[in-house]
Image (cartoon, helix red, strand yellow):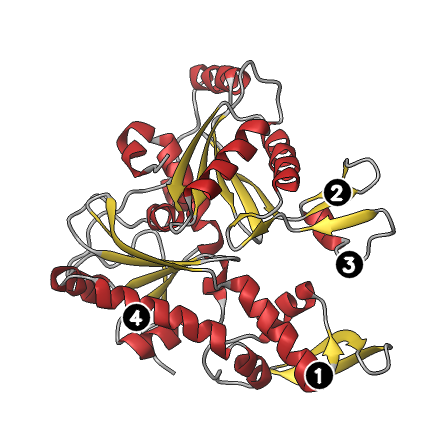
Amino acid sequence: MLELHQSIEPNNFPIGRESMPLIQHDLIRTNKQQKPKPTTGNNWRHLLTSFIGQDMAMDLGTANTLIYVRGEGVILNEPSVVAVNEDTGKPFAVGRAAKEIFGKTPRGVKCVRPLKDGVIADFKMTHVMIKDFITRASKTWQMRRPRLIVSVPSGITMVEKRAVIDAALSSGARHISLMEEPMAAAIGTGIPVHEASGYMIVDIGGGTTEVAVTTLGGTAYSESIRIAGDEMDEAIESFIRKAFNLQIGIFEAERIKVSIGSAMPMSEARELKIFGRDIATGTPREMIIDDALVRHALKEPVQSIVDAVILTLEKTTPELAEDIINNGVCLAGGGALLAGLPERLSLETGLQVMRASSPLTAIVRGAGHVLESFKEYQHVCIA
């Protein structure tokens, strides 16, 4: 097993050949670094601000949507799923409650995932979902609607940008700013993006994998492919159907990936009992599979992610390549939690590959940091 993999903690991201201070963030401070308790005046100021309007940052993801509220941190993390009554058009359940009943709904109720490959696939359902999440995050009556920063894939088209803006505005936001997910992930992991040094960030979400090289507060080169966590789930579902004549649900495939999925052979073999419907007989059936089978099923999507990283490295200048050798590669996003992925990328590229300490929230924390210091970071917004 390679020894190159490590987790990035707030104070140990390698910066060149020497350790340099990082941009600290409220959500990643240790207990010893917590801010002092606010004074009475600050409490009144915070209360007044919450009534006037709560600005928010949103990671509108294919698999999960997260919301950061200014001054409070990440307060919402829900699956991007909506259950709606087909007769009335009213939402039946949104978020985690909708995911729990996915595939189990009665007639007249359907569950949908309104985002596909990182962009809006169902505008109406996305509007319903965003409105519900903003309402939950707001908590109090406000004099004005919130300002919102939304992270989007770097390869998004103008039409897809317009769809995100329209959905957010119609859901209750007064002003929308968009920023690319790789930049948000880089800021969220503590990378000093304003420095004249190259850093590679690999954000593996539910619908897209974003690979980018950042320097001087911008992106020198980026690569976006629509292969990520969802494609891994679909690959597992397809493999089990073809190999064992067993039809499983998409969230059962996700459970398999999370439980025993890996990109490299592990030190110990692992097994898992799975459940589905026998295609030949139509009856329910259960069976046991091991991690080697799941790894075989994930071969193609994992290789696509590796190829995207290699392609990005090929496009970088020699000067930036030197920086990346010194600084390493950072993995963020829920897909980065796949076991053995840092080791696999290290083996394929020869670089040090590190997983962020909290990859699931890296993007929304980065967008939240921009929200907190908007004057300093407003140039990173693309719309």
Q: Position of residue 200 (x, y in %)?
A: 28, 59
Mark 4: amino acid:
Ile
Label 3, label 2: how far apart the Cα atoms are: 13 Å
**Residue designated by label 2:** 93
Mark 3: amino acid:
Gly
Q: Quick one: SS at disc 2?
A: strand
**Residue designated by label 3:** 103
Residue extending furthest front? 159
Q: Which label sits in the foreground, 1 or 2?
A: 2
Name the side, left or right, on which 325 lies relative to 90.
Answer: left
Residue 375 occupies which quadrant of the picture?
Answer: top left
Q: Which residue is drawn at 33% across and 30% down?
A: 374
Label 3, label 4: how far apart the Cα atoms are: 38 Å
**Residue designated by label 4:** 310
Q: Quick one: SS at disc 3?
A: loop
Q: Which residue is drawn at 54% across and 43% down?
A: 66
Q: Quick one: SS at disc 4?
A: helix
Q: Position of residue 284 (x, y in %)?
A: 84, 76
**Circles 1 and 2 in contact, beta carbons < 8 Å:** no
